[in-house]
Image (spheres, grey):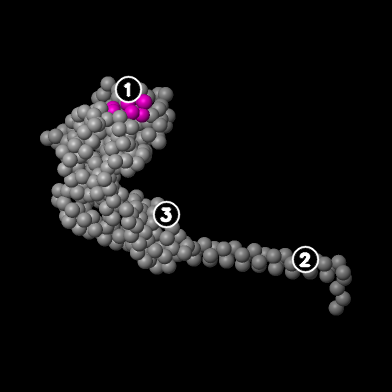
Amino acid sequence: MYISNKNKGVVLLSVLMVILLLSSIAAYLGNKYFISLKRFAYLEYQTHAINYYRGVESISINRIKEEIDANKKYLPRNHPLLNDTFSYEANNGFIKTTVKDISNCINVNSLVRLENNQLKDNSENIKRVKKLFDLLQIDEIYANEFIDQAIDWIDKDSDPRPYGLEDYYYTGPLVNPKHYSGMRYFYDLNELKSLPVSRIIGWNHIVENFCALPITERSYININTFKKGEGIMLASAFEELSIDDAEYVIFNMPEEGFDELNTFFNNFSNIDFGDVYTDINFSTNKFLLVSELITDEFNSKSQITIYYGNNKNGDILARTYNGI
């Protein structure tokens, strides 16, 4: 049978179109199959990661309990618990963990205290926050706004404090998007971004000096675990202590730390501390457990806040996962 050159071109073009179409379908199906495999691998990693993090969490709580019980009320900054990185094998990878002391940050929830099931102002912590903002050279009016807006967020009433904000002010006609006070403790530091004054103070100042722990106990600092560059946090705890003097204290602190208050003050008898705005301790009951799971394909991180209180159980205050 004779086929003209013109018809040959049409047949060839049709064949090429069919091949191109089949190639596109094959590529599409192959891509879908690859994505499905990737998704399955990620779901498997996600399940394993949570189990690994919970296992490391349990091991770390036991390690904290052993160290605190062994050292009683004494935990210096050179202690292996706060300096070592603990590593564990995992499927196609490993998990590494560090433990940090977070007792020296200012817990924003400690601006109030619970008394007879009523929230009251915590005057000592309020003084410490005011001293901190004074050291940061932030105007007193903004310090008052921060304190009152934070307390109005926590308290249950709808009556704004002198420098505070309640729902009416958050939801005024000029405010967009609408904001409401939480009427609860802050669970995460990022929630402080809801306070209008945080934009004036500067987020870096808040992140570097505050934390959000859902407890309102009278806070204390572990005088033994301050490090170079944290002078402003130490200075905020004392009425008369300057940043320079605080850095001097930290620099000249013995690595093994102190275990008695009089010894500490006698060691720095040339320093004017003034009144104390928080309890001073030599150990720690608030820890941040930071873990990272690294495998051939995926990475993720975990941050767990542990409170080792009077019940000595190692209570979990917060869990944050990234990457799973």
Q: Amino acid at mark 2?
A: Leu
The residue that label 2 is drawn on is 13
Q: Position of residue 73 (x, y in %)?
A: 17, 48
Provide the secondary structure element on which disc 1 rests. Answer: helix
The residue that label 3 is drawn on is 323
Disc number placed over residue 140 in the picture, else none: 1
Count of number-bearing discs = 3
Please tell me which of labels 1 and 3 falls first in the chain.
Answer: 1
Q: Position of residue 109 (x, y in %)?
A: 25, 37
Please tell me which of labels 2 and 1 falls first in the chain.
Answer: 2
Provide the secondary structure element on which disc 2 rests. Answer: helix
Q: Quadrant of residue 222?
A: top left
- How packed mark 3 is, by other alpha carbons closer than 10 Å (few <14, some 14-19, many 20 or more), is few
Q: Quick one: 100 or 234, which is closer to the camera?
A: 234
CB within 8 Å, label 1 to label 3: no
- How packed mark 1 is, by other alpha carbons closer than 10 Å (few <14, some 14-19, many 20 or more), is few
Viewer-nearest of discs 1 and 3: 1
Q: Is residue 81 above or below residue 44?
A: above
Most common secondary structure along the magenta stretch? helix
Report the quarter where the C terminus lies.
bottom left
Q: Position of residue 154 (x, y in %)?
A: 26, 34
Q: Is residue 4 above or below residue 188?
A: below
